[in-house]
Image (cartoon, rainbow, N blue to C red):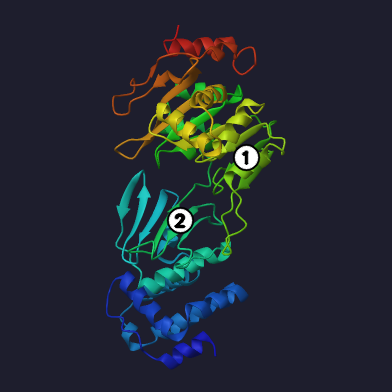
Amino acid sequence: MTLSERVRLAGNAAQATSTTDGDLLIALKRQMRDLVSVDELARYAQDNPERARNEVRSACRRIFEGATWASVDGATQSRLVMQAIDAIFGFGLLEDLIADESITEVIVNGPDEVLFERDGKLVQTDRRFTDPGDLRALIDRILGPIGRRIDESSPIVNARLPQGHRVNIVVPPVGVDGPYITIRKFSRHVITLGEMEESGSVEGSVRSFLSWAVKARKSIAVVGGTGSGKTTLLNALSYEIPSDERIVTIEDSAELRFFEHPDVARLEARPQNAEGTGEITIRQLVINSLRMRPDRIVVGECRGEEALDMLTAMNTGHEGSLTTLHANSPAESVSRLTTMVRYAAELPVDVIEANIASAIDLVVQTRRALDGSRFVSDVVSLTFDSTTCRCQAVSHYERGLGADAGIWVGCPAWVGELPIVEVASEEEVAAWKRACSLE
């Protein structure tokens, strides 16, 4: 029996008494749920997606023939049909939020609360799911195409969606009031350092300095808190890598994008499967990347024992590599790296810090201001004074103090070598120093 025939037999079971699209959609979905299960609709979609959508359209037309829907105008009915299709086959209530390029994060806190982030600020919506089962059906639709499973025995999933977005899902019993969904969106457009300068995220003098540092093969660690723009800056820095160099990227969930670079190998870690096997860690990927003839290694985020192998690579012929890590200040980043290295090997702290200072040329701090904007606040170089790794300030910028709030404190010695390695001319370096009051 087709879905349309089932609707005809169901008659006018729906009670469409509300006037808002949200309530009308809930009534429509409830009637359709009485006629066919979500699993059956999913099977329709797998066998013949277009036919499945046509069945839904036909079913909706039959439902709208009922007397209880007589007061709903044609435009609203058409809109409800599209929303029902999105709810059944797509992201449902989240479809238009995910499609909106201006939205950077979508958050679901149980069936009754949906939020999104735009311009660095969270916005509460009046959207709600019909019931917890409706939300769980959406979770199944999200995870189905990527072959992941979530249940009480494995209640947490981190994954990458086909669109490139990163998704985290937590269900009970871990999610006490859940399920919870957090989708971090990534723009199809790669933001460059030049565009970051135009938006005010980085000063012009800092943009030139960072571009030169990448081209001069200086290893850089981008540090900052959650949501401070670390990955965006890392991608912008990666965009400055010359096209004749081979890049190997290593990430938990592949987020970095290289649309124009001709030679990029992207590696992505893999969690354990349902049987508890098959895990591929970031550390394993870092070790393997050394066998892939990389000119640059880009580690999306350094958070564990892979720090030892990353520093070793930077110190043994892979200069110019890039990474990010969570830290609230450049000095704290040194302590964090030291701790992460000791996860892998019980080395003396002074030996680890000597390796950090030797491997990483620059630490770039990103911050998020109270108004939600993200910006580069500090650039420091690392030195080792026989016992301790020290941060030597290069530039500092304080948001909210005006356009002239950025100051240059020092200039690394390698800037003077840029004309020699043909990264920048003597005139460009001299003009930059004058603009930064470094002469």
**Residue 158, position as x, y percentages in the image:** 49, 55
Residue 43, quarter of the rendered image:
bottom right
Residue 166 vs 291, above or below: the answer is below
- Determine the residue positioned at 49% across, 35% down: 233
The residue to which callout 1 is attached is: 286
- SS of the residue under disc 1: helix
Residue 5 vs 427, above or below: the answer is below
Kindly identify the amino acid type of the residue bearing the numbered disc 2: Asn
Label 1 vs label 2, nearer the camera = 1
**Residue 344, position as x, y percentages in the image:** 55, 38
**Residue 423, position as x, y percentages in the image:** 61, 19
Kindly identify the amino acid type of the residue bearing the numbered disc 1: Val
Q: Quadrant of the N terminus?
A: bottom right
Q: Is residue 425 visible?
A: no
- Determine the residue positioned at 40% across, 55% down: 106
Residue 176, quarter of the rendered image:
bottom left
**In the shown orientation, is residue 285 left or right of residue 74?**
right
The foreground one among 330 and 295 is: 330
